[in-house]
Amino acid sequence: MNVVHDDCDPGGSNLGSVRIEAIALSAEGGVLRARVLAERLAGGRHPDDVARVLVGFGPASAGLLHSTSWRFEDGGVVLTYAAVPDPLPAASAAVVDPGPLHSSGDWLRPSPTFVPLAAVVRHACRHLAFLRRSDPRLGADSFGEPAVWGLIDAFAPAVSGQLSATGVVA
């Protein structure tokens, strides 16, 4: 899975920086797909605004943009958002399948040394599946995208400690 970076320095000079990562989800070809885009937060912009622009949501767009996680990476913080539906869906976007959880395995050091992008996307999908079941406003309004939400619903929604290593509710 590839991420499209805009103004991000992978060389490690990001110490103290914040990078916004936006995962745009679609149901192209009957499978869940994700475009992942990223940009460094700068110029006093609000992270929500950066994520909205990254995925292509305009002033008249309807959908959901939700912050799903954060992680420390390359000396800075990555704040991840998920967007449904992808306003610019592409059949070439990466396929997203439910898969195993990714963790450090150490209760006192919860952050893994490295988190694969596919694990971040799966986490975002589990987060959205949980939100859909726990927020009655979202359950009633899927923004006209039942195919996308049907695929997201396949992800096991549960809070930490209730999932097995395979991503299935324990």
Image (cartoon, rainbow, N blue to C red):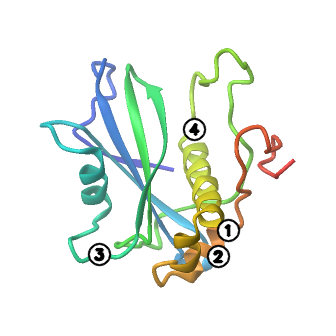
Q: Amino acid at mark 3?
A: Ser
CA gap, disc 3 and disc 1? 23 Å
Residue holding disc 1: 153
- Residue placed under numbered mark 4 in the picture: 116
Per the model, the C-alpha gap separating discs 3 and 2 is 21 Å
On residue 61, the disc is 3
Question: In the rendered structure, which amino acid carries the disc numbered 1?
Answer: Asp
Q: Are marks 4 and 2 in contact (CB under 8 Å)?
A: no
In percent of width and height, residue 167 lies at: 77, 49
Q: Is residue 155 left or right of residue 112?
A: right
Q: Residue 11, percent across and down?
A: 32, 22
Relative to 84, is 96 above or below? above
Could you tell me which residue is drawn at 43 percent across and 45 percent down? 80
Circle 2 is placed at which residue position? 150
Q: Which amino acid does the dot numbered 2 rest on?
A: Gly
Q: Nearer the viewer, mark 4 or mark 3?
A: 3
Tag 4 secondary structure: loop
